[in-house]
Image (cartoon, coloured by chain):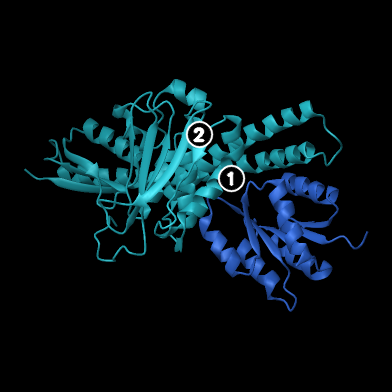
Chain colours: A blue, B cyan
Amino acid sequence: MTDAPLVLLVEDDAAIRGAFTLLLRECGYRVDSAATGGEALSLAAAVRPDVVVLDLGLPDANGVDVARALCAGPRPMPIVALTGRAFDDDRDAALQAGCSLYLVKPVATRDLLGAIETLSKS
Amino acid sequence: MTQLRLHIAGDEGTAARLRELLAREGFRVLEDGAGAAGTGVALVLDDAPAGGTAARIEELDRTILELRNLDVAKSQFLANVSHELRTPLTAIVTYGEILRDGLLGEVSARQREAIESMISSCRQLLGMIEDILTYARTNARAISLQPTEFRLDDVVAAVHDMNASLISRKSLRFAAPLPRDLPRVLADRDKVAHILGNLIGNAIDFTPDLGSVRVEARPSASDPGWVEVQVADSGIGIDEQHHELIFQEFAQVDASRARIHHGTGLGLAIARKFVQLHGGRIWVESELGRGSRFFFTLPTPEVVPDTPLPS
């Protein structure tokens, strides 16, 4: 089953990371996860994920900067940004930084799965 | 008689504390009202009480600074706490949805119903936390608008979809007959979605089963170049004496209503703030027992820049 798309999940909260990892694995994806922006960048370079799910509210770095760095390489990877409803400014910045889609937290599992499916096929 | 004019950038709570303090110090407030920017409070005082006026003014200056710092600290605290509350709830909702959708094994109809109730309560709680977070953030820092041109019916449809399950559970009739030729508005789409989300959410909350919720929009008759949006419901209505109160932070018409209808009392305050940021107006027409009609105005690209807008 190495053909299953690989999702890199970047989320600082362990409980949410655990829930999303379980969800994605149960739905047939391979999942790597990172809790910080720094971890995300080194992991992304190492494993070349098919889709990145990126929480914009990270403890060590600005999520938008992380998105920009992920998109800067020769093979930019599709990113789903997760933003809070109260952080309106982040959304346009996320799209400008190269994120393909954004979902507003709290994200419904169906929306997340739909976004990942769309991007992993593109 | 010397008069002292103070302008305080802060919220109503800060102003109330200042008024209390002034009264205690023996000052008399001659005039009281919102500041020019609509974000502060202007007080005009008559002559200072007996004793060193300069010293008292200095003391007041210090107090104002302290209150302002306290106000910012309060908003920051609210934002932090809301964020911390939201995170574990998000995990609960996600695990709930994983269970509900049978990803970890088949669930019976009764189990699914129980899980669905759990998820819906969590989402309600998340909505309230979101309100507090939004309120705290709009108070803690200046918010900027990112206006774009868009069709209102798209946003209304999106807000309807978000509330679809609640509308069908309460068997409400929902209609949004927006005219096809309604001018596009020039506004911050996320903020408008937020305003409509709060108004439509309230309409659903305060309307008993089998009632109706209706969204309409038309070019404003009194403000050329503006669109007037109306969210009407057949719900419990609001007594006229409360028409202003409900737009204030943390206001609930009465405690029993708050207990039945949950809200944080912030939804309309946020809606008003967002409408005013666009230079628009928001108001309500309602009578107890006769439903409510909330109105607000949004600019279209036709609004000429030299139209006097509240800044």
Determine the image quadrant of residue A63: bottom right
Q: Is residue B256 left or right of residue B124?
A: left
Q: Which chain does the numbered disc 2 sit on?
A: B
Q: Mark 1 points at which residue?
A: B161
The front one of B229 and B124 is B229
Same chain under badges 2 and 1? The reply is yes
Q: Residue B101 carries which label?
A: none
x 53%, y 49%: residue: B157
> Badge 2, how many Cα within 10 Å: few under 14, some, many 20+?
many
Q: Is residue A13 visible?
A: no
Sequence-wise, which precedes: disc 2 or disc 1? 1
Q: Classify residue B301 as left or right of residue B223.
A: right
Picture coordinates of residue B299 (x, y %)?
35, 57
Q: Which residue lies furthest to the bottom in this view?
A: A74
Q: Looking at this view, is B159 or B132 the one in front?
A: B159
User: Badge 1 sits on which subunit?
Assistant: B
Position of residue B227 measured from the top left corner of the image (x, y, whole percent): 35, 53
- Where residue A32 sits, quadrant-wise, is bottom right
Q: Please tell me whether mark 1 sits on a helix, a strand or a loop.
A: helix
Amino acid type at image mark 2? Ile
Mark 2 to mark 1 CA distance (whole Å): 13 Å
Q: Name the residue under label 2.
A: B204
Above or below B46: residue B191: below
Quadrant location of the C terminus of chain B?
bottom left
Residue B293 in the image: x percent, y percent? 37, 36
Q: What residue do we see at 73% from left, 63% from top?
A: A119
